[in-house]
Amino acid sequence: RRVGEKDASPAKPGRSRASPDSFFPKADVATMGSEEKKPDCVKVAVRMRPLSSKELGNNESSIVDLEESAGDTPGAVTINDPEEKEKPAQFAFDIVFGTGCLQEHVYETVGKPALTSTMSGYNGTIFAYGQTGSGKSWSMMGGPGELRGIIPRVNEQIFVHIDEAMQEVSTRRFL
């Protein structure tokens, strides 16, 4: 949904719903996130892939501008009309990763908090959504070594957690 745009979907019966304008009164992305922080159940992260060698070979350029998130400050994605017939559309997200973002940073920002919550007994889900070739598999699986994606890093940490828990149990003594 665009920042400041009214939600066209009807409210579910039996549930009250605040208007989108109460969340984004003036589409001011700069002030978003400055309210008192409450824990969120859902966070939305966006990762932009770099242009492919084919795209670079065709002298294509990106129509997307990013304001990467920093700490608790959300990020924004602006999509520009290459023909400049329409004004740019801006969207706010909890987390925005640029094209130079390392796999480790994505894991530390998205994967590790989800894993920590899950290991504490809460439900946790990470899913990648996007069109073909947008980088979903790369973000989730990655490559070898430091290029590992979220899934191999989470799997590794699960076994580290199990090993630490087993060591803790084996050092306990009962009389």
Image (cartoon, rainbow, N blue to C red):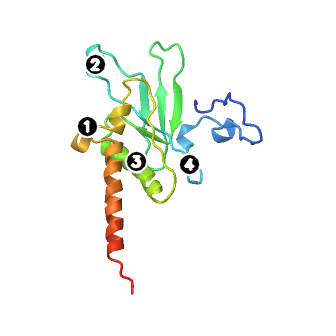
Mark 2, residue position: 56
| CA distance separating discs 3 and 4 | 15 Å
Looking at the image, is mark 2 or mark 1 earlier in the sequence? 2
Of callouts 2 and 4, which one flags the residue occurring earlier in the amino acid sequence? 4
Drawn side of residue 90 relative to residue 142, left or right? right
Instruction: Assign the N terminus to one quadrant of the image.
Output: top right
Q: Which residue is drawn at 76% across and 37% down?
A: 13
Residue that mark 1 sits on:
143
The residue depicted at 74 percent of the width and 42 percent of the height is 15
Amino acid type for the residue under numbered disc 2: Leu
3D distance between C-alphas at marks 2 and 1 = 22 Å
| Mark 3 and mark 1: Cα distance apart in space | 16 Å
Q: Earlier in the sequence, mark 3 or mark 2?
A: 2
| Residue topped by disc 3 | 111
Q: Give the amino acid at mark 3.
A: Gly
For the residues marked 4 and 1, what is the alpha-carbon distance in whole angstroms? 30 Å
Other-residue count near label 2 (Cα within 10 Å), few / some / many at <14 / 14–19 / ≥20? few
Residue placed furthest toward the bottom: 175
> Mark 2 or 1, which is nearer the eye?
1
Q: In which quarter of the image is residue 96?
A: top left
Q: Are marks 3 and 1 in contact (CB under 8 Å)?
A: no
Q: Judge left or right: residue 146 versus residue 85.
A: left
Tell which of 17 and 169 is nearer to you. 169
